[in-house]
Amino acid sequence: MHTSRWPLALVTAIACRGSDDDGAPVSSSSSDTAVASATATRGSDTGASDDETGMSDLTGSTSTGREDSSDSGPLSTSGGPDAAFTITKTGTTFIATSTADPRFGVEIDCDDEATDGRYFGVTPIIDGQRLEVQMYGGPLFPLFTPDFDAGTSACVQVESDDVRLLVRLETGSYQALDPAATDQPVPLDVEFTIEGDRMVARTAGIYYMMLTRADTDLTITHGQVDMRTIDAATPAFTENFDDVTHLVAADSIYGPLEIDGDIARLQVQLYDDGSEGFELDLDHAFKDLGQTSVTLTVAFG
């Protein structure tokens, strides 16, 4: 559950190298690496430590900082011809497309809904279907949405090597979620790979997943197995499930999602505010039970 259903006050800014590169493929600056990166820097590194979030094993790279609305600076990008994903930039949005199978893509929106009606976050795109949904009577929210209750969000990294696409977003601080917690930023890390004929995302941090309510069946394994069906006629509800290890979401628009991991507390929440989707809210794993990072493997299709 979050404190404001449509966080209009959350504004972020990403500085670009210049308008001449908008919409163009990110080009390589080194023949020795096949890495496409979008890493914003500010003074010193404010990212959460590997010990706190468990990010080191997930990303295999280190964040050099972040850029938000309070600190504009140059945004550095580079890439190589052998990268698993090509990356193009239009304004403050990065679009990554699999080189192995162009049916799979990812859009990283690095600003709020004011410019394009789409909220900050990470949207998988499969066979042209964008995994996003209108929420809170307002804009479109991506499947992977940073925890806006924590404060202002920033894109820190968009990077592809020859195997995977790495994305890192940071938002506010853990202290905003729990006054007794650290003031380190709350991360959302996502690693995308193409495995066989489907895309797989490996996530870590504290974040939301936004599913549609057109007609979605949830199968939740948490010691026992519970099933829920959510559609347009389902009344508003909030339900918590502890120690979740497996979840299958059969979404009539997104298609099937198979999710494995360790969620201390999963909150499923549906609002009655005209939302066309509902929340898989992972921040209560931290708020209620102190889990600083929820690591999941999400297989699409």
Image (cartoon, rainbow, N blue to C red):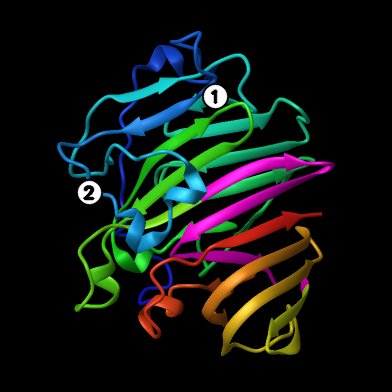
SS type, badge 1: strand
In the image, residue 106 sits, relative to residue 253, either above or below, namely above
Residue 48 lies within the magenta run? no
Please say whether residue 50 is visible from this viewpoint. yes
**Observer-nearest of 237 and 224:** 224
| Quadrant of the drawing holding the N terminus | bottom left
Counting from the top left corner in percent of width and height, residue 154 is at 34, 46
- Is residue 220 toward the left or the right of residue 188 in the image? right
In the image, residue 6 sits, relative to residue 55, either above or below, namely below
| Quadrant of the drawing holding the C terminus | bottom right
Return the residue at label 2.
46
- Name the residue rendered at 67%, 67% in the picture: 260
- Name the residue rendered at 43%, 49% in the picture: 56
Q: Main secondary structure of the magenta part?
A: strand
Alpha carbon of mark 1 to alpha carbon of mark 2: how far? 27 Å
Counting from the top left corner in percent of width and height, residue 135 is at 55, 66
Return the residue at label 1.
88
Camera-side mark, 1 or 2: 2
Magenta segment boundaries in residue numbering: 190-215
Residue 214 lies within the magenta run? yes
**Observer-nearest of 73 and 33:** 33
Counting from the top left corner in percent of width and height, residue 155 is at 38, 42
- Name the residue rendered at 29%, 59% in the picture: 9
